[in-house]
Amino acid sequence: MGIRLGLVLAAMLLLRPAQAAEPIRAVATFSILADLVRQVGGEHVAVASLVGPDADAHGYSPAPGDGRTLARADIIVLNGLGFEGWIERLIRASGSKAPVVVASRGVATIPGRHEHADDRAGEGEADHGDAADPHAWQSIQNAKVYVANIRDGLSKADPARAADYAANAAAYLAELDALDREIRREVADIPPEHRRVITTHDAFGYFSAAYGLRFIAPQGVSTDSEASPRDVAQIIRQIRRDKVPAVFLETIADPRLMEQIARESGAKIGSKVYSDALSGPSGPAATYLDMMRANLRAFTAALGRG
């Protein structure tokens, strides 16, 4: 009897480390957030992304399995700022009781805008709505706020490993600071008169505010919006007048509008850029850091250096 009890106790002790090492289940709404959660969570977190690489979260229609994924989650991470208009209904429908982390909480927001050409003046004019631009991750300083919110959320959901989350976040924040300096150096080498960028939808407002490139888009802050023929005609005239050298296709967008603008304006089409989604694992933007560097390379190659 004593031997049998000893064997049972030994087996229990052997099982405890495996149980303690079980990763918590995190669900992020889209691929960029999922990568940030992986960077902070490391081996302690198993991350699922509802909207995968190269997919558009703006107009996403939840799949039948998404509710089940949320129901099994230990923590849910979303962007907020109205980016995922479908997520609150989906969480309610799933019955999930997992804590929700709003990664953008505390960022310095800018208004959502649709900037277009103004034939009467040399500069564009912006239509500002009341809603904030949701693409806050396009500024490294805002991405650092995301990381801090994710760190705090994971630490609250899994306090036993809070020290590891803090260490992972600190290391990643140092990488973000280095990337921020890199972007500033590269943009500084672009001649000021070339610092105009045409993209499909207005996803780069925070990049513009942080680093000094000026972005003009035929669509607004959501890919669900449609550019009017007047907007397109004005942008074509502005490209010709200001000699904007290139237009950029976003990986999540239908290329036909930008191809029309390039064809009619004489601007060349630059490399594809990543606004709302990462690439697949084998692509050039498999992580947030890779994405920001891939976009930077596209902009500097097309816009030239001093």
Image (cartoon, rainbow, N blue to C red):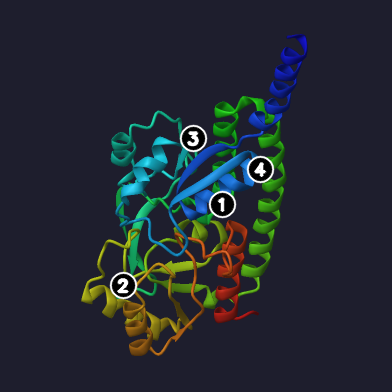
Q: Position of residue 26 (x, y in %)?
A: 51, 40
Q: Quadrant of residue 215?
A: bottom left
CA–CA distance between discs 1 and 4?
13 Å
Name the residue type under label 1.
Answer: Asp
Distance (Cα) linking label 1 and label 3: 15 Å
- 110 and 120: which one is in front? 110
Residue that appears at 49% across and 47% down = 48
Q: Residue at x 29, y 54 (%)?
A: 61
- Image position of 186 (left or right of 33): right
The amino acid type, in three-letter code, at marker 2 is Asp
Instruction: Name which residue type carries label 4.
Output: Glu
Classed neighbour count for the residue bearing mark 4: other residues with Cα under 10 Å, few (<14), some (14–19), many (≥20)? few
- Point out the tag, 1 or 4, that comes first from the N-terminus: 1
Badge 3 vs badge 2, beta-carbon distance below 8 Å: no
**Residue tagged by mark 3?**
75
Task: Give the residue at x 74% y 19%.
Answer: 7
Looking at the image, tell me whether mark 4 or mark 2 is earlier in sequence order.
4
Q: Residue furthest front?
A: 1
Dot 2 corresponds to which residue? 118
Residue 278 in the image: x percent, y percent?
A: 51, 61
Q: Of the numbered discs in the image, which one, if any, rests on residue 35?
A: 1
Say what amino acid the circle numbered 3 marks: Ile
Side of 28 relative to 88 (left or right) = right
- Per the model, the C-alpha gap separating discs 4 and 2 is 52 Å
Q: Secondary structure at mark 4?
A: helix
User: Residues under labels 3 and 2: Cα distance?
Assistant: 46 Å
Q: Are marks 2 and 1 in contact (CB under 8 Å)?
A: no
| Of residues 303 and 269, the one drawn nearer to the viewer in this rendering | 269
Q: Earlier in the sequence, mark 3 or mark 2?
A: 3
Mark on residue 43? 4
